[in-house]
Amino acid sequence: MARAVRPSRRLPDPEPHDLAVPVGMARRRFHAMGTTVSVLLPVSQVAAPTKAVEELFATWEERLSRFQLESELSDLNRRAGEPVTVGPVLFDVVSAALDAAQVTEGRFDPTMQQQMVTLGYNQSFEKLRIVAPIAGQEPRPAGDWRQVRLDDTRRVITLPPGVGIDLGGIAKGMAVDAALARLKAMDVEAALVNAGGDLAVWGLPPGMDAWPIAIQGKDTWYTIPLSAGAMATSGISRRRWQQGTVTRHHLLDPSTGLPVDNELWSVTAVAGFCGQAEVAAKAAFMLGPAEGQRFIESRGLSGLLVREDGSWEAAGRWPVAMAVRT
């Protein structure tokens, strides 16, 4: 059984407190889905849109969190091996995650909940403590996404026995997309929704031709312009913990069930939608620097791959010449 040996800790803030807010915009922040969510809105359109985004994230967390025992996802995982009727949010996100697994040939794998638990990641990260290894257990390779069955007509999901789903980053990314869609429907003129570095934008700040977006490198921050679309980052800087004497992180290699070790510190991808960017960033991270770069470019996307030694390489149309070190 895991035993705690030190107090829990909050995640470091993924957004610098001194990050400039464009003139005419206001920032609102709240905690949801295990991270800080930041919303930038016109100063004349703050109250109702902010409340709408908070409510959406609260609803998605209630449906999709593997750490909340009463969530729909937790119920689905407990009932692995039997058909389970679920709500539209969970069904749509699981369906998108399985599509992503197929497109990436399993490099993105949503069926690694049991591997995460075996490695000690069994509660939300801000509550996670140093844990002892589970005696006699080692994570096994993944790939069980191929055996998950969906019934679109009845909105039923059947997991293989002994398999659990962890939606993690794709749930955050798709929540960002859904939040931005809601803001558009409310006739918000311009907005940025950022969930721990997974973000999407709509419109432009007053008098500007792009949003200035801060990207964290190994030892510094860079600012790049984003005029449309979305961005997501997968990396090992924040979700790291000790299991006994071994350092773990949350990006697991589906071929081994263990944390991937390939020189990369982070991968940032830019795409039309945040869920799409999240999948691209994670798949590229699994592939490593050279193959990850080729993967991003082969999808017509752009990105930044940062190594553990601080060096980096751009992929696609990443605006290298316009990056400003901060």
Image (cartoon, rainbow, N blue to C red):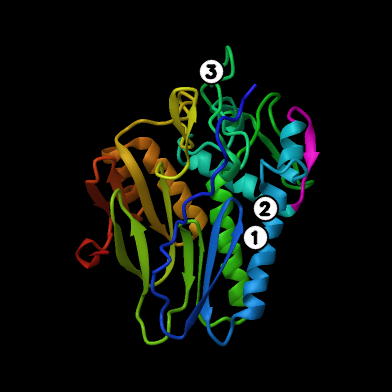
Residue 322 colored magenta? no
Q: Secondary structure at mark 2?
A: helix
Task: Give above or below for 114 relative to 314.
Answer: above
Please report the residue visible at 51 percent of the width from the left and 79 percent of the height from the top.
26
Of helix, strand and loop, which mostly describes the magenta segment?
loop
Is there a contact, CB below 8 Å, between mark 2 and mark 1?
A: yes
Please report the residue visible at 26 percent of the width from the left and 39 percent of the height from the top.
290
Tell me the crowding category of disc 2: few under 14, some 14 to 19, or many 20 or more residues within 10 angstroms, Cα based. Answer: many
Tell me the crowding category of disc 1: few under 14, some 14 to 19, or many 20 or more residues within 10 angstroms, Cα based. Answer: many
Where residue 323 appears, as percent x and y from the top left, is: 25, 64
Report the magenta residues as a range.
Answer: 80-87
The residue sitting at the top extreme is 136
Please tell me which of labels 1 and 3 falls first in the chain.
1
Q: Which residue is mark 2?
A: 61
Q: Tell me the CA gap for discs 2 and 3.
A: 29 Å
- The amino acid pointed to by label 1 is Phe
On the rendered structure, is 176 left or right of 315? right
